[in-house]
Amino acid sequence: MSCFFVCNPQKTAISMNKKNTLIFSVFLILYICTSCSVRRYETYPPRTSSASTNLTRRLSTQYGIQVTQRDNFTLYNAIAQWLGTPYRRGQSSMRGTDCSGFVFNIYRSVYGKNLARNSADMLRRNCRSISLQNLQEGNLVFFATGRNLKKISHVGIYLKDGKFAHASTSNGVTISNLNEPYYRQRWVSGGVVR
């Protein structure tokens, strides 16, 4: 049989063309099948799905501010889980927390940073002071709420539009406005965490 292919070059050429055509066809089919899979690439800004739209609506309602795709959803979601947690001095769990415990836990979970466990120490050790006008999402806000109005005794996390999250002694973890007279009078500094 092999002598037939060697001795008859015309038959060998036809046979080789059929083999090449078959191999080419197999590769073509494989190429088409593998190239038909859909690849999803991240777009900027991210596409809005119904789930993220519902999340945006829910967070906007809870915070009283318009949460957009440009906001840090990880931060807002972490804070949302803590909303309503009762105030407990010296504690830092979802069963009860004080202001520095709340900020400590949020910063550790969202940004992977360990802060001091005392509001005055947070500003002194972990932050660079900034003015009220330069606050950005995620910055810390410091207040003097005790008898000594020069000593930092309260901390929260700035969100946007004058709103900040904190653990208040009367309402637990909540959202308040920097423009409220109580906080305006007790404002000390903003802080950018280093």
Image (tube, helix red, strand yellow):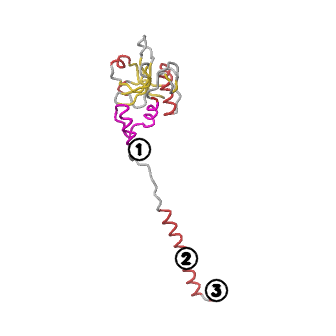
Q: Is 177 part of what is drawn in magenta?
A: no
Work out which quarter of the rendered image holds the N terminus and state it.
bottom right
Report the disc number at residue 9.
Answer: none
Mark 2 → mark 3, Cα distance in angstroms = 18 Å
Q: Point out the stretch of residues depicted in magenta.
A: 53-81
| Residue count near mark 3 (Cα–Cα under 10 Å), binned few <14, some 14–19, many ≥20 | few
**Amino acid type of the residue that numbered disc 3 sits on in the rendered structure:** Val
In front here: 130 or 33? 33
| Residue count near mark 1 (Cα–Cα under 10 Å), binned few <14, some 14–19, many ≥20 | few
In front here: 85 or 52? 85
In front here: 51 or 2? 51
In the figure, is residue 163 to the left or right of 102?
Answer: left
Say which residue label 1 marks.
51
**Amino acid type of the residue that numbered disc 1 sits on in the rendered structure:** Ala
In front here: 188 or 47? 47
| Residue count near mark 2 (Cα–Cα under 10 Å), binned few <14, some 14–19, many ≥20 | few
Residue 67 on image: x %, y %: 36, 36
Say which residue label 3 marks.
6
Report the disc number at residue 20.
Answer: 2
Q: Residue at x 36, y 35 (%)?
A: 60
Q: Residue at x 51, y 73 (%)?
A: 25
> Do residues under tags 2 and 1 come within 8 Å of each other at their CB atoms?
no
Q: Secondary structure at mark 1?
A: helix
